[in-house]
Image (cartoon, helix red, strand yellow):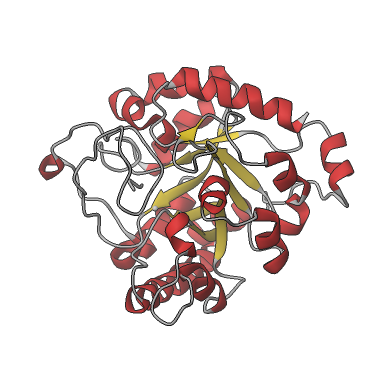
Amino acid sequence: MTTRRHFLRDAGALTLSGLVLPTFTNAHDFFSTANPYPIGIQLFTLFGPMNEDPKGTLQKVAAAGYKEIESAFNTRGGYYGYSAKEFRKLVTDLGMTWRAHHAGGAPFRPRPTPPASTTSAAGDAQRPARPAMDFSKMPPMLNLRDNYQQLVDEAVEGGLAYLVCSSTPVSTVEEINKSIEVFQKTGEAAKKAGIGFAYHNHATEFDPVDGGKTPYELILSQTDKELVKMELDLAWATKAGKDPVTLFNEQPGRFPLWHIKDIKDDRKTITEVGNGMVDFKRAFSAAKVAGLKYFFVEQDMAPGGIESITTSITNLKKILA
């Protein structure tokens, strides 16, 4: 899968103070309140356009009705060619709020570009082929293993609420243990800076590794729940056969961030929100249990670009109505 993860303490505390959102006692309270959560977007959805024309693409995102931004891996360096402060201003000037940023858990290693019409040997969902690019000329990418403090510092400079690990090696227990160590250090640094830290899952986190445990189980059981939160990707959890509401009940309050992603009935093809099998209404009925604070629409490198994100927000508004 293609993925995409020193006034600071005082500024971070101000950021954290803005995390509280309305509390709902039950599903009726949530859905009877007019869309209490502003709709956000994960910019990996518009990977190509954001690398080609960040400002122009963000203008279209704002025009489509999105209010919050989660940034991701890009080929321009930094934050789509901007510093954290510059990107924050760009987003704010367009009437949106930059809430979170994705950073890799380990150094970036590009994979061969797969054909758009095939799936991986593991049966990963179909996605558009990555745009051809010369990785040798791409600026170095920061990662949590080697640069967690810098990434935390820049997150605070950008006024973010959360720094998120987009992906990390989890194929073996050894890899998982190394990732857990990185998560703990990053979570501690984030807490000191006054922001949150979370880990974003894919379907593979629910596959058993040596010993029969899954990466998901090991990460959540061996990290401090106050330092390491989860950004649950609803489509990847659904693909893995997991019920998001059950996950929320097992770890209440640990899911402040969600990826609102949809997948077709074949459990392979990522699609626009509302055009697949994910039961978003059921998930949102458990928002309080989950501890939801922000959510971001994501469709990995959406083939329809702005048209796709417009379909997603239109459908999502109907679901939340």
Q: Is residue 295 left or right of residue 1?
A: right
* Residue 55, image x, y percentages: 39, 23
Which of 92 and 132 lies nearest the eye of the viewer? 132
Determine which quarter of the picture holds residue 300. Answer: top left
Q: Is residue 69 left or right of residue 285?
A: left
Q: Is residue 316 left or right of residue 272?
A: right
* Residue 124, image x, y percentages: 38, 48
Q: Is residue 176 above or below residue 305?
A: below
Determine which quarter of the picture holds residue 68. Answer: top right
Looking at this view, name the residue that lies furthest to the left: 136
Q: Residue at x 63, y 21 (%)?
A: 314
Q: Residue at x 28, y 34 (%)?
A: 129
Q: Is residue 24 above or below residue 6?
A: above
Which of 297 and 10 lies nearest the eye of the viewer? 297
Q: Residue at x 73, y 64 (%)?
A: 249
Which of 284 and 270 lies nearest the eye of the viewer? 270
* Residue 192, image x, y percentages: 53, 68
